[in-house]
Image (cartoon, helix red, strand yellow):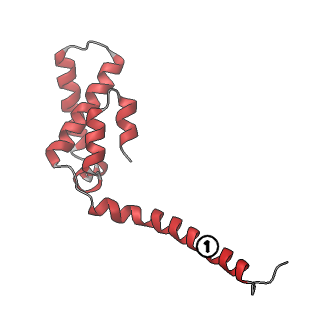
Amino acid sequence: MPQLSSPATRAEVIATLLIVLAAVGFVLSKPLRRSLSSHPSPDTCAALLDRYVEHIVHAINDKPPASELASRKAQARTLASTDPKFARCPTYLTVDEAACAMRANNADEFERCLP
């Protein structure tokens, strides 16, 4: 086994340690980066909910009646008003995630945009 006193071995240990610390730092910095990012407004969060409902309803029925779509949106808004996950939308999601979700063409793409 090589001794740690050789310059090459010490350099390898230091390089490995720096790589591990950089990876850990990147992972731990994600919540900090998220909190410092711009967040969507409550109106944008409501629009996200409506858009998601549209995707779900259209997945079930390609051409749903307008009344069904309106009814499902109202039902979703009622449920969201008491859901703590939805309440944190304006403080947790980033503007980029919200924009990605609004551009989505279906519910699967929409869900991939959000954490």
| Image coordinates for residue 103, horizontal then vertical, percent | 27, 33
- Which residue has dot 1 on it? 15
Figure check: 83 above or below 16 = above
What is the tally of numbered marks visible in this picture?
A: 1
| Image coordinates for residue 18, horizontal then vertical, percent | 56, 73
Tell me the amino acid under the disc marked 1.
Ala
Residue drawn at the location 40% of the way across and 31% of the way down: 108
- SS at circle 1: helix
Residue drawn at the location 26% of the way across and 26% of the way down: 54
| Image coordinates for residue 52, horizontal then vertical, percent | 28, 32
| Image coordinates for residue 32, horizontal then vertical, percent | 35, 66
| Closer-to-camera residue (21/30) | 21
Name which quarter of the figure residue 55 lies in.
top left
Figure check: 6 above or below 111 = below
Residue drawn at the location 38% of the way across and 32% of the way down: 109
Residue drawn at the location 24% of the way across and 37% of the way down: 49
**Residue at the extreme front:** 7
Structural crowding at the residue carrying mark 1, measured as other residues with C-alpha within 10 Å and reported as few (<14), some (14–19) or many (≥20)? few
* Residue 41 in the figure: left or right of residue 60: left
Quadrant (top left/top right/bottom left/bottom right) for the N terminus = bottom right
* Residue 113 in the figure: left or right of residue 89: right
Figure check: 61 above or below 53 = above
**Residue at the extreme right:** 1
* Residue 101 in the figure: left or right of residue 78: right
| Closer-to-camera residue (107/74) | 107
| Closer-to-camera residue (94/83) | 94
**Residue at the extreme bottom:** 5
| Closer-to-camera residue (32/3) | 3
Name which quarter of the figure residue 33 lies in.
bottom left
